[in-house]
């Protein structure tokens, strides 16, 4: 599995943890999504329609080639926000090429299918797919 080190560490911790801990970790990561910075407006956000939750994202690549991720989702959707928080913690600052190499279903390695419905898992995959689609022109 081609995962960046920070994302790999998160996957390993969750994979070796009890089911109840995975739920707590998702809730913790859901609180780590910062508000959008001033330079990102609602017009800059792209909706991930495959998510049950209204979920929006923006992706930027800076002059040094580092990727920056911005997410917006309602606080009432802690599962999706938690997954976005994991992506933010694991992928922020990585190159587009590194992110494009992440397997689309990497989250199954965390055991999330035991705590999240199949429909939510589909939405999680769609978030990563949308990030990758945004990065392909930059790669």
Image (cartoon, grey):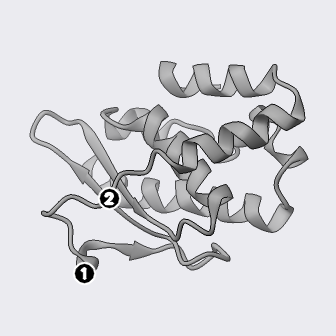
Q: In this view, does 55 lie to the left or right of 126?
A: left
How many tags in the picture?
2
Quarter assignment of residue 103: top right
**80 over 101 or under it: above or below:** below
Q: How crowded is mark 2: few (under 14 residues within 10 Å), some or many (20 or more)?
A: few
The residue sitting at 30% across, 34% down in the picture is 93
Which residue does the numbered mark 2 point to in the structure image? Answer: 35
- Quadrant occupied by the N terminus: top right
Q: How far apart are marks 2 and 1 (CA)?
A: 15 Å
Q: What element carries label 1?
A: helix
Tell me residue 40's x, y (percent).
20, 66
- Is residue 106 in sight in this rendering? no
66 to the left or right of 5:
left
Image vertical order of residue 32 relative to residue 75, above or below: above
Name above or below for residue 94 compared with residue 35: above
Q: Quadrant where the C terminus lies?
A: top left
Q: Which residue is drawn at 70% across and 21% down?
A: 13
| Rendered residue at 80%/68% (across/down) | 119
Residue that label 1 marks:
43
Q: Residue 3's x, y, as percent? A: 55, 26
Helix, strand or loop under label 2: loop
| Marks 2,1: beta carbons within 8 A | no
């Amino acid at each position: 599995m081609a995962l960046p080190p920070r994302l790999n560490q998160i996957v390993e911790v969750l994979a070796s943890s009890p089911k109840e801990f995975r739920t707590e970790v998702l809730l913790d990561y859901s609180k780590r999504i910062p508000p959008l910075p001033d330079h990102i407006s609602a017009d800059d956000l792209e909706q991930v329609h495959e998510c049950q939750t209204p979920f929006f994202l923006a992706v930027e690549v800076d002059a040094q080639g580092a990727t920056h991720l911005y997410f917006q989702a309602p606080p009432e959707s802690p599962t999706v926000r938690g997954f976005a928080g994991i992506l933010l913690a694991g992928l922020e600052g990585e190159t587009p090429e590194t992110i494009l190499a992440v397997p689309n279903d990497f989250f199954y390695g965390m055991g999330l299918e035991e705590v999240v419905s199949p429909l939510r898992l589909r939405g999680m995959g769609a978030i990563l797919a949308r990030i990758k689609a945004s990065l392909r022109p930059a790669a």
